[in-house]
């Protein structure tokens, strides 16, 4: 089960499940791995955030990881597209808006390595 996320105004918590309908559309599951490249940076703080049809959400992860680590990311989102942002030590290294269902086989890569 995924952690609760604060939704809307107030302190009401919601536990969304895959393919549940709401005012914004269908709730879907996002599950990918983020690979930290062997870039010589060593240990760094990795934060992953996303936006969906309901707006910006709290960080999915915000924890230290070393180069070469493979980090599993999973969360529930609403709508067709999300914007995924990945930060290393407060520096944005990935920022992309996409349809996770249409790109489910694509890898999430540090944009500096392109």
Image: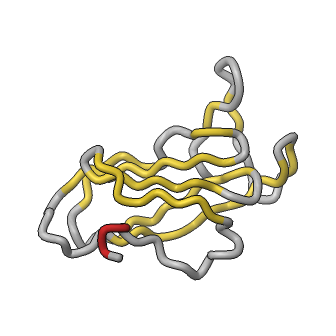
Q: Is residue 59 above or below residue 87?
A: above
Direction top: furthest residue:
10
Please tell me which residue is depicted at 66% across the width and 48% down the height of the picture.
52
In-front residue for pair 61/92: 92
x, y percent for residue 60 = 48, 48
Q: How is the image coloured?
A: secondary structure
- The C terminus - image quarter: bottom left
The picture quadrant where one finds residue 106 is bottom right
In-front residue for pair 9/55: 55
x, y percent for residue 103 = 63, 75
How many numbered marks have been drawn onto this rendered protein structure?
0
Q: Is residue 35 above or below residue 41?
A: below
Please tell me which residue is depicted at 46% across the width and 71% down the height of the picture.
108
Please tell me which residue is depicted at 31% across the width and 74% down the height of the picture.
113
x, y percent for residue 70 = 35, 71
Q: Is residue 84 above or below residue 70?
A: above
Please tell me which residue is depicted at 21% across the width and 54% down the height of the picture.
44
In-front residue for pair 69/53: 53
Direction bottom: furthest residue:
105
x, y percent for residue 6 = 63, 31
Judged left or right of residue 36, residue 61 is: right
């Amino acid at each position: 089960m995924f952690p609760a996320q604060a939704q809307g105004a107030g302190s009401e918590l919601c536990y969304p499940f895959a393919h549940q309908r709401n005012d914004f559309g269908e709730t879907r599951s996002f599950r990918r791995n983020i690979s930290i490249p062997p870039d010589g940076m060593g240990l760094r703080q990795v934060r992953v955030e996303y936006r969906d049809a309901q707006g910006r959400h709290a960080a999915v992860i915000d924890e230290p990881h070393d180069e070469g680590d493979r980090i599993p990311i999973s969360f529930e989102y609403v709508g067709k597209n999300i914007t995924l942002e990945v930060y290393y030590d407060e520096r944005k290294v990935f920022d992309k808006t996409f349809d996770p269902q249409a790109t489910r086989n694509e890898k999430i890569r540090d944009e500096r390595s392109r």
